[in-house]
């Protein structure tokens, strides 16, 4: 299954950050949740507060997202 994940990232000052879009593959939403907590630059890695969205998407949306967002 393919998922779109939005996380709060960055360490750019106290209480400040930015949202980053990730496109991940996983067996279920719970596995994606745990995988997203280990991604680089994610704030509050020990909690789920940094996860803003986990949405199941199609293979086509996944491929398009990887191509669009992987070179940022």
Image (tube, grey):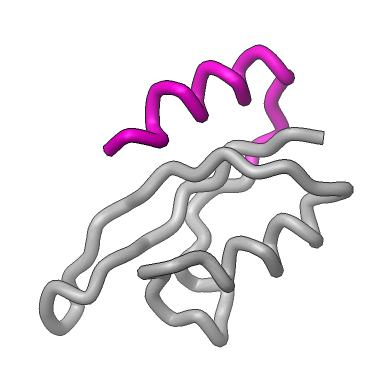
Give the side of residue 56 with respect to residue 23, left or right.
Answer: right
Magenta segment's dominant SS is helix
User: Is-magenta flag for residue 25?
Assistant: no
Q: How many marks?
A: 0
Considering every residue shown, the one lying at the far front of the view is 71
Answer with the quarter of the image where residue 56 lies.
top right
Q: Look at the image and tell me in which quarter the N terminus lies.
A: top right
Q: Nearer the viewer, residue 35 or 44?
A: 35
Answer with the quarter of the image where residue 35 lies.
bottom right
Q: Position of residue 71 (x, y in %)?
A: 32, 34
Residue at figure coordinates x 57%, y 39% from the top left: 23
Q: Position of residue 42 (x, y in %)?
A: 41, 69
Considering every residue shown, the one lying at the far right of the view is 27
The vertical placement of 42 against 1, above or below, is below
Considering every residue shown, the one lying at the far top of the view is 60
Q: Position of residue 4 (x, y in %)?
A: 58, 37
Give the side of residue 67 with respect to residue 2, left or right.
Answer: left
Residue at figure coordinates x 19%, y 78% from the top left: 15
Q: Nearer the viewer, residue 49 or 9?
A: 9
Q: Position of residue 30 (x, y in %)?
A: 80, 60
Give the side of residue 25 with respect to residue 5, left or right.
Answer: right
Q: Nearer the viewer, residue 40 or 12?
A: 40
Residue range (magenta): 55-72
User: Is-magenta flag for residue 62?
Assistant: yes
Q: Look at the image and tell me in which quarter the C terminus lies.
A: top left
Answer with the quarter of the image where residue 69 lies.
top left
């Amino acid at each position: 299954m393919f998922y779109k994940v939005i996380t709060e990232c960055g360490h750019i000052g106290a209480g400040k950050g930015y949202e980053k879009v990730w496109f991940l593959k996983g067996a279920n939403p719970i596995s994606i949740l745990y995988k997203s907590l280990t991604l680089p630059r994610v704030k509050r890695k020990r909690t789920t507060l940094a996860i803003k969205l986990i949405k199941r998407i199609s293979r086509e949306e996944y491929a398009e997202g990887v191509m669009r967002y992987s070179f940022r």
